Image: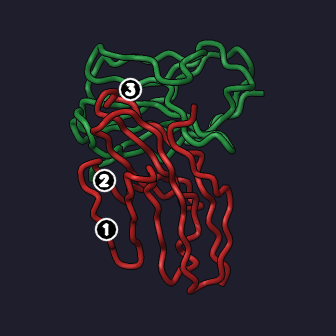
Amino acid sequence: EAQVTQNPRYLITVTGKKLTVTCSQNMNHEYMSWYRQDPGLGLRQIYYSMNVEVTDKGDVPEGYKVSRKEKRNFPLILESPSPNQTSLYFCASRVLGNGYEQYFGPGTRLTVT
Amino acid sequence: AQKVTQAQTEISVVEKEDVTLDCVYETRDTTYYLFWYKQPPSGELVFLIRRNSFDEQNEISGRYSWNFQKSTSSFNFTITASQVVDSAVYFCALSEAGTGNQFYFGTGTSLTVIP
Protein backbone atom coordinates (compact mmCIF):
# COMPACT_ATOMS: atom_id res chain seq x y z
CA GLU A 1 0.00 0.00 0.00
CA ALA A 2 1.33 3.40 -1.03
CA GLN A 3 1.68 5.51 2.06
CA VAL A 4 3.50 8.10 4.10
CA THR A 5 4.19 7.07 7.67
CA GLN A 6 5.11 9.24 10.62
CA ASN A 7 6.30 8.35 14.08
CA PRO A 8 5.42 8.99 16.77
CA ARG A 9 1.78 9.91 16.29
CA TYR A 10 1.59 11.64 19.65
CA LEU A 11 4.37 13.12 21.72
CA ILE A 12 4.46 15.13 24.91
CA THR A 13 7.83 16.54 25.82
CA VAL A 14 9.45 19.28 27.85
CA THR A 15 11.12 22.47 26.75
CA GLY A 16 14.65 21.96 25.51
CA LYS A 17 14.63 18.20 25.12
CA LYS A 18 15.72 17.33 21.60
CA LEU A 19 13.32 15.22 19.58
CA THR A 20 12.99 13.73 16.13
CA VAL A 21 9.81 12.96 14.23
CA THR A 22 10.40 10.40 11.52
CA CYS A 23 8.76 10.37 8.11
CA SER A 24 8.99 7.66 5.51
CA GLN A 25 7.32 7.12 2.12
CA ASN A 26 7.23 4.06 -0.11
CA MET A 27 6.23 5.72 -3.37
CA ASN A 28 9.74 6.61 -4.55
CA HIS A 29 8.83 10.30 -4.50
CA GLU A 30 11.60 12.80 -4.96
CA TYR A 31 9.82 15.60 -3.14
CA MET A 32 9.06 15.56 0.58
CA SER A 33 8.00 18.29 2.95
CA TRP A 34 6.94 19.10 6.48
CA TYR A 35 4.01 21.24 7.55
CA ARG A 36 2.60 22.40 10.81
CA GLN A 37 -1.09 22.96 11.33
CA ASP A 38 -2.32 25.46 13.87
CA PRO A 39 -5.89 26.65 14.55
CA GLY A 40 -6.82 29.56 12.33
CA LEU A 41 -3.55 29.40 10.41
CA GLY A 42 -4.05 26.39 8.17
CA LEU A 43 -1.01 24.44 7.08
CA ARG A 44 2.31 26.18 6.88
CA GLN A 45 5.36 24.68 5.24
CA ILE A 46 8.42 24.22 7.44
CA TYR A 47 10.98 22.61 5.13
CA TYR A 48 10.97 20.73 1.89
CA SER A 49 13.37 18.52 -0.02
CA MET A 50 13.55 17.95 -3.76
CA ASN A 51 15.89 15.00 -3.52
CA VAL A 52 18.57 13.34 -1.41
CA GLU A 53 20.82 15.90 0.23
CA VAL A 54 18.72 18.78 -1.15
CA THR A 55 16.63 20.67 1.39
CA ASP A 56 15.20 24.17 1.55
CA LYS A 57 13.29 26.38 3.94
CA GLY A 58 9.58 26.84 3.75
CA ASP A 59 7.62 29.63 5.39
CA VAL A 60 8.26 28.80 9.07
CA PRO A 61 11.68 27.05 9.38
CA GLU A 62 12.85 28.67 12.63
CA GLY A 63 13.53 26.13 15.36
CA TYR A 64 13.52 23.12 13.04
CA LYS A 65 16.07 21.07 11.17
CA VAL A 66 15.69 18.37 8.56
CA SER A 67 17.90 15.93 6.72
CA ARG A 68 17.48 13.84 3.60
CA LYS A 69 20.09 11.12 3.56
CA GLU A 70 17.83 8.58 1.87
CA LYS A 71 15.11 9.12 -0.67
CA ARG A 72 12.40 7.52 1.41
CA ASN A 73 13.11 9.25 4.75
CA PHE A 74 12.79 12.87 5.81
CA PRO A 75 13.06 13.32 9.58
CA LEU A 76 12.11 16.54 11.34
CA ILE A 77 14.39 17.53 14.19
CA LEU A 78 13.63 19.94 17.00
CA GLU A 79 16.94 20.60 18.70
CA SER A 80 15.48 22.61 21.57
CA PRO A 81 11.69 22.50 21.49
CA SER A 82 9.70 25.37 22.92
CA PRO A 83 5.99 25.63 23.80
CA ASN A 84 5.27 27.61 20.63
CA GLN A 85 6.17 24.51 18.65
CA THR A 86 3.18 22.70 20.12
CA SER A 87 1.29 21.82 16.98
CA LEU A 88 0.05 19.14 14.61
CA TYR A 89 2.76 18.16 12.15
CA PHE A 90 2.30 16.58 8.76
CA CYS A 91 4.83 15.05 6.45
CA ALA A 92 4.01 14.87 2.75
CA SER A 93 5.52 13.53 -0.43
CA ARG A 94 4.86 13.86 -4.13
CA VAL A 95 6.37 13.44 -7.54
CA LEU A 96 8.80 16.25 -8.32
CA GLY A 97 7.49 18.70 -10.87
CA ASN A 98 4.72 21.18 -11.18
CA GLY A 99 1.16 20.41 -10.35
CA TYR A 100 1.39 17.05 -8.63
CA GLU A 101 -0.74 16.50 -5.58
CA GLN A 102 0.83 15.77 -2.23
CA TYR A 103 0.24 12.64 -0.19
CA PHE A 104 0.17 13.27 3.52
CA GLY A 105 1.13 11.18 6.51
CA PRO A 106 -1.32 10.70 9.38
CA GLY A 107 0.08 13.56 11.44
CA THR A 108 2.04 13.88 14.67
CA ARG A 109 0.53 15.79 17.55
CA LEU A 110 3.32 17.39 19.55
CA THR A 111 2.91 19.07 22.90
CA VAL A 112 5.83 20.93 24.44
CA THR A 113 5.39 21.89 28.08
CA ALA B 1 -0.06 38.65 1.83
CA GLN B 2 -2.18 35.56 1.96
CA LYS B 3 -2.02 33.73 -1.35
CA VAL B 4 -5.09 31.63 -0.63
CA THR B 5 -8.07 33.02 1.22
CA GLN B 6 -10.88 30.95 2.62
CA ALA B 7 -13.06 33.59 4.19
CA GLN B 8 -15.56 31.14 5.66
CA THR B 9 -14.10 29.87 8.90
CA GLU B 10 -17.04 27.70 9.90
CA ILE B 11 -20.21 26.66 8.12
CA SER B 12 -23.13 24.61 9.44
CA VAL B 13 -25.80 23.14 7.22
CA VAL B 14 -28.61 20.71 7.71
CA GLU B 15 -28.26 17.37 6.01
CA LYS B 16 -29.35 17.34 2.34
CA GLU B 17 -28.72 21.05 1.92
CA ASP B 18 -26.25 22.22 -0.71
CA VAL B 19 -23.20 24.13 0.47
CA THR B 20 -20.47 26.07 -1.30
CA LEU B 21 -17.01 26.59 0.12
CA ASP B 22 -15.23 29.63 -1.22
CA CYS B 23 -11.59 29.86 -2.20
CA VAL B 24 -9.91 32.97 -3.58
CA TYR B 25 -6.28 32.89 -4.64
CA GLU B 26 -3.66 35.40 -5.60
CA THR B 27 -0.82 34.78 -8.04
CA ARG B 28 1.13 36.51 -10.76
CA ASP B 29 2.10 33.28 -12.46
CA THR B 30 0.26 32.33 -15.61
CA THR B 31 0.77 28.65 -14.85
CA TYR B 32 -0.47 27.48 -11.50
CA TYR B 33 -2.35 24.64 -9.86
CA LEU B 34 -5.20 24.63 -7.41
CA PHE B 35 -6.12 21.86 -5.02
CA TRP B 36 -8.76 20.94 -2.49
CA TYR B 37 -8.07 18.67 0.46
CA LYS B 38 -10.45 17.27 3.04
CA GLN B 39 -9.53 16.74 6.69
CA PRO B 40 -12.16 14.63 8.45
CA PRO B 41 -12.37 14.49 12.25
CA SER B 42 -9.90 11.59 12.22
CA GLY B 43 -7.26 14.11 11.14
CA GLU B 44 -5.77 12.79 7.93
CA LEU B 45 -5.57 14.96 4.83
CA VAL B 46 -7.31 13.57 1.78
CA PHE B 47 -6.70 14.88 -1.72
CA LEU B 48 -9.90 15.76 -3.57
CA ILE B 49 -9.03 17.54 -6.79
CA ARG B 50 -6.35 19.35 -8.78
CA ARG B 51 -6.91 21.99 -11.43
CA ASN B 52 -4.36 23.73 -13.62
CA SER B 53 -4.68 27.32 -14.71
CA PHE B 54 -5.30 26.43 -18.33
CA ASP B 55 -8.32 24.30 -17.64
CA GLU B 56 -11.33 26.32 -16.59
CA GLN B 57 -13.81 23.55 -17.12
CA ASN B 58 -15.92 22.89 -14.12
CA GLU B 59 -15.69 19.42 -12.69
CA ILE B 60 -18.25 17.19 -11.08
CA SER B 61 -17.57 14.07 -9.10
CA GLY B 62 -20.69 12.59 -7.61
CA ARG B 63 -22.08 15.11 -5.13
CA TYR B 64 -18.94 17.25 -5.39
CA SER B 65 -18.40 19.97 -7.96
CA TRP B 66 -15.80 22.63 -8.45
CA ASN B 67 -16.14 25.99 -10.15
CA PHE B 68 -12.89 27.55 -11.37
CA GLN B 69 -13.11 31.17 -12.52
CA LYS B 70 -9.89 32.90 -13.46
CA SER B 71 -11.68 36.23 -13.90
CA THR B 72 -12.41 36.32 -10.17
CA SER B 73 -9.43 34.20 -9.05
CA SER B 74 -11.77 31.75 -7.39
CA PHE B 75 -11.95 28.00 -7.11
CA ASN B 76 -15.12 27.22 -5.22
CA PHE B 77 -16.26 23.84 -4.04
CA THR B 78 -19.91 22.80 -3.84
CA ILE B 79 -21.32 19.80 -2.06
CA THR B 80 -24.79 18.87 -3.21
CA ALA B 81 -27.21 17.13 -0.86
CA SER B 82 -24.74 17.22 2.02
CA GLN B 83 -24.34 14.26 4.32
CA VAL B 84 -23.03 13.91 7.85
CA VAL B 85 -19.90 12.23 6.46
CA ASP B 86 -19.07 15.49 4.69
CA SER B 87 -18.37 17.10 8.06
CA ALA B 88 -14.69 18.02 7.91
CA VAL B 89 -12.26 20.85 7.47
CA TYR B 90 -11.65 21.65 3.83
CA PHE B 91 -8.46 23.26 2.60
CA CYS B 92 -7.83 25.00 -0.68
CA ALA B 93 -4.22 25.21 -1.86
CA LEU B 94 -2.18 26.86 -4.59
CA SER B 95 1.05 25.79 -6.25
CA GLU B 96 2.75 28.14 -8.70
CA ALA B 97 4.89 26.91 -11.57
CA GLY B 98 7.40 29.62 -10.78
CA THR B 99 7.78 28.31 -7.23
CA GLY B 100 6.51 24.84 -7.96
CA ASN B 101 8.04 23.32 -4.91
CA GLN B 102 5.90 25.21 -2.43
CA PHE B 103 2.26 24.73 -1.65
CA TYR B 104 0.27 27.58 -0.18
CA PHE B 105 -2.72 26.51 1.87
CA GLY B 106 -5.70 28.52 2.94
CA THR B 107 -6.73 28.57 6.57
CA GLY B 108 -9.49 26.05 5.99
CA THR B 109 -13.26 25.97 6.29
CA SER B 110 -14.81 23.79 8.95
CA LEU B 111 -18.04 22.27 7.68
CA THR B 112 -20.55 20.72 10.02
CA VAL B 113 -23.48 18.84 8.57
CA ILE B 114 -26.27 18.50 11.08
CA PRO B 115 -28.43 15.38 10.81
Q: Which chain is green?
A: A
Chain letter for mark 3:
A
Label 2 secondary element: strand
Colouring used for the render: by chain
Residue at 70%, 34% in the rendered image = A111
Q: Quadrant of residue A102?
A: top left
Q: Is residue B89 left or right of residue A106?
A: right
**Is B110 rendered above or below residue A91?**
below
**Is B92 rendered above or below residue A53?**
below
Q: Quadrant of residue A56?
A: top left
Q: Residue B90: x and y, percent?
A: 53, 57
* Depth check, front residue: A32 or A15: A32
Q: Colour of chain B?
A: red
- Give the residue at mark 1: B59
- Give the residue at mark 2: B51
* Depth check, front residue: B81 or A74: B81
Q: Is residue B100 left or right of residue B8?
A: left
Chain letter for mark 2:
B
Answer whether labels 1 and 2 touch (C-beta < 8 Å).
Answer: yes
Label 3 secondary element: loop
Label 1 secondary element: strand
Q: Residue B14: x and y, percent?
A: 65, 82
Disc 3 to disc 2, C-alpha distance: 28 Å
Disc 3 to disc 1, C-alpha distance: 35 Å
Residue at 58%, 58% in the rendered image = B89
- Give the residue at mark 3: A74
Tell me if mark 1 has few (under 14), some (14-19) or many (20+) residues whose alpha carbon lies within 10 angstroms of its own. Answer: some
Quadrant where the C terminus of chain A lies? top right
Instruction: Name the kind of residue labelled 2 in the image.
Output: Arg
* Depth check, front residue: B37 or B2: B2
